[in-house]
Image (cartoon, rainbow, N blue to C red):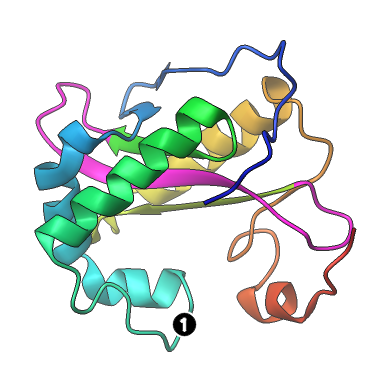
Amino acid sequence: MYNTPIVPANFKVPVELVTHRMKLRPLTIQDVDKDYDAVMSSANRLRTIFDPGGDWPEGLTLEQNAIELGWHQVEFQHRTSFAYTVASLDESSILGCMYIYPVIKSDYDVEVTMWVRESEADTGLDAHLYKTVDDWISQIWPFKNPAFPGRKITWKVWSSLNQGG
């Protein structure tokens, strides 16, 4: 768990971003069933997005997912990281997630990652999510140099960067 807030105390953390295709809002424990369905139905895709060659989410149980969502929710409340669910406009399904994490890599102040479920991979939602989040981060959030590993920087380069201070 992260301990230090990544935004100033006077920054009003956004709690919703709505476009014509999706709604971003804080990921909470109440999302456990829909989130678990999105993760498990997209397991192969997730392995290519995060830690290529890794095995997550293999072995993930509903209970473990609930623990992870609770963790994300507490970190959001403490302003130490921010996990957003990407929901359909009617909230009937989880379409993916977006995360803002602190980093200790030289020259970057946060790491921003995101994914959309397998069933949305060919609909253009991923590109829409990325553009929307990139614009939102640059226009609303107080970060000077956010990193978008797997997007603006390859995972290989990201992994090779020195840890800064």
Residue 48 horizontal/vertical position (percent): 40, 77
Specify the amino acid type for callout 1.
Pro
Residue at screen point 87% across, 62% down = 106
Q: Is residue 32 left or right of residue 56?
A: left
Q: State the residue lying farthest toward the bottom.
A: 53
Report whether residue 127 is seen: yes
The residue labelled by disc 1 is 52
Instruction: Please state, as top left, top right, bottom left or bottom right, where the C terminus lies in the image.
Output: bottom right
Residue 97: in magenta span: yes
Q: Is residue 69 above or below residue 165?
A: above
Report whether residue 123 is seen: no
Residue 79 horizontal/vertical position (percent): 58, 30
Residue at screen point 22% across, 23% down = 89
Residue 86, quarter of picture: top left
Residue 45, quarter of picture: bottom left
Q: Nearer the viewer, residue 51 or 90?
A: 51
Q: Is residue 106 above or below residue 113?
A: below
Residue 163 horizontal/vertical position (percent): 83, 69
Instruction: Please report the bounds of the magenta region as a residue range.
Output: 87-109
Residue 68 horizontal/vertical position (percent): 31, 52
